[in-house]
C-alpha cells in the first residue's frame, strides 16, 4: 500500500516571514528579558522561591523559543 509522500521541508517553508513570525520573535525576546528581570529582582530583593520560580520559568521559556528560532534560521541557511 503506497501512501502519499510528504513534501520536503523546503517546499513547505515560505520565502518570507509572516507577521505572526515577527510577533513570535519579539515575544521570545520579551519572555527572556522579563524572566531575567524577575529572576534578578527576586534574588536580590526578596529571595522568595515563588519569584525565582516564575522568573526561571519565563527565562527558560524564552530560551527555548529563541533556540527554536535560532535553529530554524541556522538550519535554513546551511541547506544547499
Image (cartoon, rainbow, N blue to C red):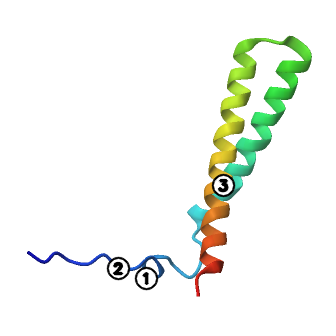
Tag 2 secondary structure: loop
Position of residue 46 measured from the top left corner of the image (x, y, whole percent)? 86, 12
Position of residue 28 measured from the top left corner of the image (x, y, whole percent)? 68, 50
Would you identify the image quadrant in which residue 47 lies?
Answer: top right
Would you identify the image quadrant in which residue 8 lies?
Answer: bottom left
**CB-based contact (under 8 Å), mark 2 and mark 1:** yes
Tag 1 secondary structure: helix
Q: Tell me the CA gap for discs 1 and 3.
A: 23 Å
Q: Which residue is mark 3?
A: 67
Q: Tell me the CA gap for discs 2 and 1.
A: 6 Å
Q: Pointer 2: residues within 10 angstroms few (<14), some, or many (20+)?
A: few
Residue 7 image label: 2
Tag 3 secondary structure: helix
Q: Residue at x 74, y 43 (%)?
A: 32
Q: Quadrant of the N terminus?
A: bottom left
Q: Earlier in the sequence, mark 2 or mark 3?
A: 2
Residue 11 image label: 1
Q: Quadrant of the C terminus?
A: bottom right
Q: Residue at x 67, y 38 (%)?
A: 60
Left or right: 38 with respect to 14?
A: right
Residue 14 against residue 21 in the figure, above or below: below
Amino acid at each position: 500500500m503506497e501512501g502519499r509522500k510528504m513534501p520536503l521541508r523546503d517546499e513547505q517553508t515560505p520565502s518570507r516571514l509572516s507577521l505572526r513570525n515577527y510577533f513570535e520573535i519579539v515575544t521570545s525576546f520579551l519572555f527572556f528579558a522579563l524572566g531575567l528581570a524577575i529572576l534578578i529582582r527576586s534574588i536580590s530583593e526578596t529571595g522568595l522561591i515563588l519569584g525565582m520560580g516564575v522568573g526561571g520559568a519565563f527565562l527558560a521559556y524564552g530560551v527555548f523559543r529563541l533556540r527554536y528560532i535560532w535553529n530554524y534560521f541556522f538550519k535554513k541557511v546551511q541547506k544547499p
